[in-house]
Image (spheres, grey):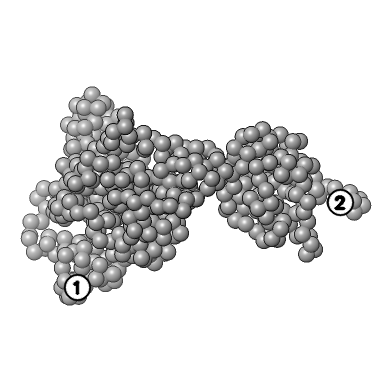
Amino acid sequence: MGLNSVSNVTEEILSAILKCIDEAIHVVNTDGITIFYNEVAARHDGLKINEVVGKPLLSVFPSLNDQSSTLLKVIQTRKPIYNETQSFVNLHGKKIDTINTTLPIFVQGQLIGAVEIAKDYSRIKQLSERLVEIQKGLQLRNGKLVKQQAGYTFSDLLTTNHHFRLVKKKAEKLAKSNSPILVYGESGTGKELFVQSIHNSSERAAGPFIAQNCAAIPENLLEGILFGTSKGSYTGAVDRPGLFELANGGTLFLDELNSMPFDLQAKLLRVLEDGAVRRVGSTSVTSVNVRVISAMNVYPGKAMEENQLRTDLFYRLNVLTFELIPLRQRKEDILYLTDIFINQYNHALMKRIKGLDEAVKGVFLAHQWPGNVRELKHTIEYMMNVCEGEVLTPQDLPMMLKNIEAKPVNKTASLVLRENLKELEVQLINDALEASGGNIQQAAVLLDVPRQTLQYKMKKLNIQL
């Protein structure tokens, strides 16, 4: 087999591989002529392969130019571009939005072209813009300001735990303030219910309540959603208010704040400091009166150590802080909430379940509930759907709970006060140390005792870090 034959076979193999990749692949030569274009790219761009291959890039995508085309920019600069957004109109007038990684192609040190791997996020962008429109529509109805969906109050946060009751009491008191609030707790501990309760107990209760999960939207879309967009900031952009403007006079809840990119966190910090927002692509600013409440599912100290949270933003948000402790640290609430959920689902499912048998109670008390109250509620819902009797039994347990060794529910367990208090004290200190990542000062704050007292008790109880 000659060299030409080997070369042809290699090209055919490479072409076959590129056609199978589930990403949009577009390759141009140094003259900007397309030399490869796969089916995925054609679907994204609303074109046919033969409309693109062999033709100058700008003739197929007339809305682009030498500066806005990532492929042509890489040809000019000979440098790669990673995860850059691009908006353009194709030959048939269809608007396309992509996120591109574009790389120069060198053969024996000579530039021969550029390859682009593109992800279509037109649909995601449409949905995100629709989200803002829905929020806007909820806020202004018939030209009047209407209250947003914040349906929970502190009376909906049910607990018999002494610590959680104190947190609720403190939050109800501080709800009247306009200072930023930071709430942290594991997933399923009820952070949004807690935040809605703060809003409904505040002077802003009649104003809008808008929630946005920072992990649910790509970075370049999240900026426009939060701060709004200005006409001309990118192809197809229109003047649209962001969530800060829509939340004016009310509360903006930013969930999973630690998922927000650092650059965007810096812009958020400026809004908190100045009380003004600048839409993407605009030079003017708009004053807003918004109370920002943020939530995280990790301990803030850990988030800062892992570069998920800017320290300057943390100290700006950390004016008022609340920790929602996990269900495993409020054992008394497990069976208490179970009875409440059983009553709720009896009504919803038209059943007459009386409660749990003793074996299931033991399993519930032994389980660590990593999903917290949400997991408990869904577990009860599942069990009541499959239960055929009047009491929930081990056979009704979901698969993940069936192998848990139950703790005996012994009503005649040791009542020696000193012994039980010591065990509880050890548990609370260990829980606080775990929650604070081993930071004794922060653990002392959580336990509401002086640092010296905590150190003395750790030594006395032989608790090691």
Mark 2 belongs to which amino acid? Answer: Val
Q: Which residue is painted at 16% across and 71% down in the image?
A: 450
Q: Is residue 258 above or below residue 238?
A: below
Q: Nearer the viewer, residue 432 or 178?
A: 178
Is disc 1 placed on a helix, strand or loop? helix
In the displayed image of the protein, which residue is found farthest to the right?
2
Badge 1 is on which residue? 451
Mark 1 belongs to which amino acid? Answer: Arg
Residue 275's tag is: none
Q: Name the spot of residue 163 as percent of width and height, x first.
A: 16, 55
Q: Is residue 349 above or below residue 420?
A: above
Q: Which residue is painted at 35% across and 62% down in the image?
A: 313
Q: Which residue is painted at 19% across and 54% down in the image?
A: 177
Q: Name the spot of residue 142 as percent of width and height, x first.
A: 31, 29
Is 433 placed left or right of 14 in the picture? left
- Residue 404 visible in the current orientation: no
In the displayed image of the protein, which residue is found farthest to the front?
284
Q: Name the spot of residue 438 as percent of width and height, x first.
A: 30, 68
Is disc 2 placed on a helix, strand or loop? helix
Is 350 placed left or right of 21 in the picture? left
Q: Which residue is painted at 68% across and 36% down in the image?
A: 91
Q: Tell which circle, 2 or 1, labels the residue nearer the N-terminal end.
A: 2
Badge 2 is on which residue? 6
Q: Name the spot of residue 399 as percent of width and height, x first.
A: 36, 40
Using the rendered view, name the quadrant where residue 208 is placed. top left
- Residue 283 visible in the current orientation: yes
